[in-house]
Image (cartoon, rainbow, N blue to C red):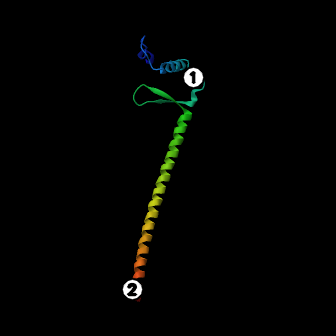
Amino acid sequence: MFERTRKRTDGRIYVDTHDDTTKKLEQMKNYKPLEDESDVIDKESGGGDASYMIPEALMESFKANEVERNHLIEMKKEIQEDHEKKKAQLEAMQIDINNQQEKFEEMIREFR
């Protein structure tokens, strides 16, 4: 299909990438699958008859990245919770300091 829809017209000037595309198409035509295809996962796309092959190592990498991402999300949540807790403690300390300051000022006024 790709080749039929992209035939060149004589006398027309084209972008230089055609030669690279042609070379890649030839490589794809000459591709010989591995004898042991057990390391490839065949995935069905949700939209119809099309399917695609994903190397198992790549899938494992995706899974590892997902685990790491979830771990980072959990760490971020813990840090935010810790920050909120420390912020509340700081506010409580500030209120306590203000109360102590008021008591001290009141004692000084009484002492005069």
> What's the distance in space between the residues labelled 1 and 2, CA to CA?
93 Å
Mark sitting on residue 24: none
Q: Secondary structure at mark 1?
A: loop
Q: Identify which residue, 79 or 19, lies in the foreground.
A: 19
Across and down, in percent, residue 62 comes to: 52, 38
- Residue wearing tag 2: 109
Give the residue number, with chain letter if any, for mark 1. Answer: 33
Could you tell me which quadrant the C terminus lies in? bottom left
Is residue 94 depicted above or below 2 in this figure?
below
Query: First in sequence: mark 1 or mark 2?
Result: 1
Question: Looking at the image, is mark 1 or mark 2 nearer the viewer?
Answer: 2
43 lies above or below 17: below
Residue 45 is situated, as x and y percent measured from the top left of the image, at: 43, 30
| Residue sitting at x 48%, y 21% | 17
Q: Position of residue 54 (x, y in %)?
A: 52, 31
| Residue type indicated by callout 1 | Pro
Question: At label 2, which amino acid type do we have?
Answer: Arg
Q: Quadrant of residue 64?
A: top right
- Among the 4 quarters of the image, the one containing residue 111: bottom left
Hey, which residue is sitting farthest top in the picture?
10
Q: Relative to 102, does residue 74 appear above or below in the rendering?
A: above
Q: Residue at x 46, y 60 (%)?
A: 83
Give percent across and percent down for residue 85: 45, 63
Q: How many residues crowd around disc 2 within 10 Å: few (fewer than 14), some, or many (20 or more)? A: few
Determine the residue positioned at 54% across, 20% down: 27
Q: Are marks 1 and 2 in contact (CB under 8 Å)?
A: no
